[in-house]
């Protein structure tokens, strides 16, 4: 029997309970990354904890979420405070992701990366996930490598710019309030540069 991996020390939600869930639950990490768009990053990564609380569970379960009545799951996401700026559409995306994990990986989120033989293979698996485009897949791959100890051969290269050491570009680089501020500053610079073009 293999030992369960040690929980990762995560600080993406900037809330102890929410971060603890992200550190021990592969599905929570995947859902947090899925929610990370058009809301502050801390809100996105707090989402899995809020969902688990509302489901009265200690962890998220892909089978349970996939089987949940879609209307009721949307209501659970919409309840105040809403889990996301767009709780209805995000409820559908979370359920789609969970259904895919059930169909392809028997509901075991960690299986997405557990036996990936290379960064390229892992990136392809992440890109196949519903709601994960190229950028999201690369950021999550960098997050796995930098903070979860998931380092198949060539992972940094596959993660592109997000895989670089000592970069402050994304969620992958956030280990506390100081690095969060650095990533925010980088994102603001990028937005300002894009506006000038």
Image (cartoon, grey):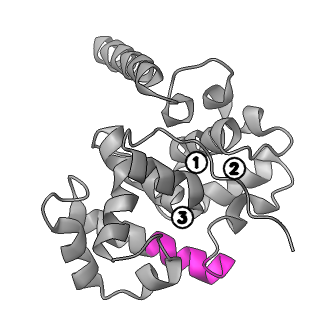
Characterize the local packing of mark 1: few (<14), some (14-19) or many (20 or more) Cα atoms within 10 angstroms.
Answer: many
Which is more N-terminal, label 2 or label 3?
3
What range is drawn magenta here? 96-107
- Secondary structure predominantly adopted by residues drawn in magenta: helix
Q: Tag 3, which secondary structure?
A: helix
Which is more N-terminal, label 1 or label 3?
3
Q: Quadrant of residue 48?
A: bottom left
Q: Tag 1, which secondary structure?
A: helix
Q: Tag 2, which secondary structure?
A: helix
Name the residue at 82% across, 62% down: 115
> Mark 3 highlights which residue?
27
Asked whether, in this view, residue 43 is left or right of residue 65, the answer is left
Q: Quadrant of residue 100?
A: bottom right
Q: Quote the CA–CA distance across marks 1 and 2.
A: 6 Å
> Mark 1 highlights which residue?
137
Taking the magenta stretch, the answer to whether it contains residue 98 is yes
Place of residue 134 in the rendered image (x, y in percent of width and height, measured from the top left): 56, 45
Q: Which mark is residue 123?
A: 2
């Amino acid at each position: 029997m293999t030992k369960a991996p040690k929980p990762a020390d995560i600080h993406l939600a900037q809330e102890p309970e929410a971060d603890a869930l992200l550190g021990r639950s592969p599905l929570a990490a995947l859902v947090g990354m899925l929610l990370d768009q058009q809301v502050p990053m801390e809100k996105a990564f707090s989402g899995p904890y809020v969902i688990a609380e509302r489901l009265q569970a200690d962890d998220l379960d892909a089978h349970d979420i996939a089987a949940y009545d879609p209307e009721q799951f949307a209501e659970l996401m919409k309840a105040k405070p809403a889990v996301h700026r767009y709780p209805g559409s995000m409820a559908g995306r979370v359920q789609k992701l969970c259904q895919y994990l059930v169909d392809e990986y028997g509901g075991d989120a960690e299986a997405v990366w557990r036996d990936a033989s290379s960064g390229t293979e892992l990136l392809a698996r992440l890109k196949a996930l519903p709601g994960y485009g190229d950028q999201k897949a690369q950021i999550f791959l960098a997050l796995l490598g930098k903070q979860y100890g998931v380092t198949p051969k060539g992972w940094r290269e596959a993660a592109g710019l997000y895989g670089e050491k000592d970069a402050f570009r994304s969620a992958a680089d956030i280990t506390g309030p100081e690095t969060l501020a650095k990533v925010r500053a980088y994102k603001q610079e990028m937005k300002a540069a894009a506006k000038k073009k």
